[in-house]
Amino acid sequence: MKIKRQKHAKKYLTFYRFNFGVREPYQVLLDGTFCQAALKNKIQIKEQLPKYLMGEVQLCTSHCVIKELESLGKELYGAKLIAQRFQVRSCSHFQDPVSGSACILSLTADNNPHHYFIATQDQELATKVKKRAGVPLMFIIQNTIVLDKPSPKSLARVEAVQSNQLVPEHQKHSIQHLKHEQGVAKDSERKGRKRKRLKGPNPLSCMKKKKKVPPQQSAASTPSQTKRKRRRKPGKSAGSESV
């Protein structure tokens, strides 16, 4: 089951890498509900997330998320301690904090320029995240961390780009990088490699050349024919004299 989950995660990461420029270190933005679920299910986020995503990870949260956890009292005290261990990303609500979900949505606005992954157990927040293209969504299910499949919004964005034949600049670089990383060569490079291969000798060149008949031999064969003609001529003259 673990191998299957990692296989899906690798597939989804490749999708986001190709189409939205997601790169390591993966920046995972966690809210209070995810921290609480990790505490309840005894999940070591710092240890398990990098293994699951098979790469370097930066765990982060926002000032508004920590303030929200503080306001909810002792029940979420453990989740607050977990969130405080992560990097706190600056937001525009420092003086007037908003809810954690509203703050996270603001950090992923304008096509998610920082390529944040959103880790949450809030279904309402997850629904809003899925309406934005290029925002990977993570959650905890059955005591395991799961990367959700690309949303219909993300798939529609990719299809629109492909139909218009418009390739973003970051996607061009990502395609080239991934081809070199995976060892996938271009068609032209493959053709060039085939030409460089050593080929065996041409079988036609190994065949024995047919000996050409020299002109002298053909000329030498004509005297016998001329002799026969000469022998016939005296016979005809003798016949004519007898007549």
Image: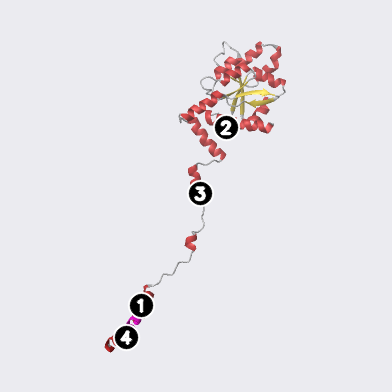
Residue 31 image offset from top left, x and y in percent: 63, 18
Q: Nearer the viewer, residue 88 or 22?
A: 22
Quickly name the residue at label 3.
194
Closer to the observer: label 4 or label 3? 4
Q: Disc 3 marks which amino acid?
A: Lys
Residue for point 57% across, 20% down: 129
Question: Which residues fall within the magenta stretch?
Answer: 227-236
Residue 144 lies in quadrant = top right
Q: CA distance from mark 4 to mark 1?
A: 21 Å
Quickly name the residue at label 4.
235
Dot placed on the residue nearer the N-terminal end, 2 or 1: 2
Q: Disc 2 marks which amino acid?
A: Thr
Query: In the image, is residue 203 above or below residue 241?
Result: above
Asked whether the viewer can see residue 90, the reply is no
Dot placed on the residue nearer the N-terminal end, 3 or 1: 3
Residue 21 image offset from top left, x and y in percent: 53, 29
Disc 4 residue crowd, few under 14, some 14–19, many 20+, Cα 10 Å = few
Q: Which mark is residue 222?
A: 1
- Residues at marks 4 and 2 touching, judged by CB atoms closer than 8 Å: no
Q: Quadrant of the N terminus?
A: top right
Judged from the image, the secondary structure of the residue bearing numbered disc 3 is helix
Disc 3 residue crowd, few under 14, some 14–19, many 20+, Cα 10 Å = few
Dot placed on the residue nearer the N-terminal end, 4 or 3: 3
Quickly name the residue at label 2.
14
Closer to the observer: label 2 or label 1? 1
Q: Disc 1 marks which amino acid?
A: Thr
Dot placed on the residue nearer the N-terminal end, 4 or 2: 2
Asked whether the viewer can see residue 188, the reply is yes
Q: Which mark is residue 71?
A: none
Q: Nearer the viewer, residue 4 or 121?
A: 4
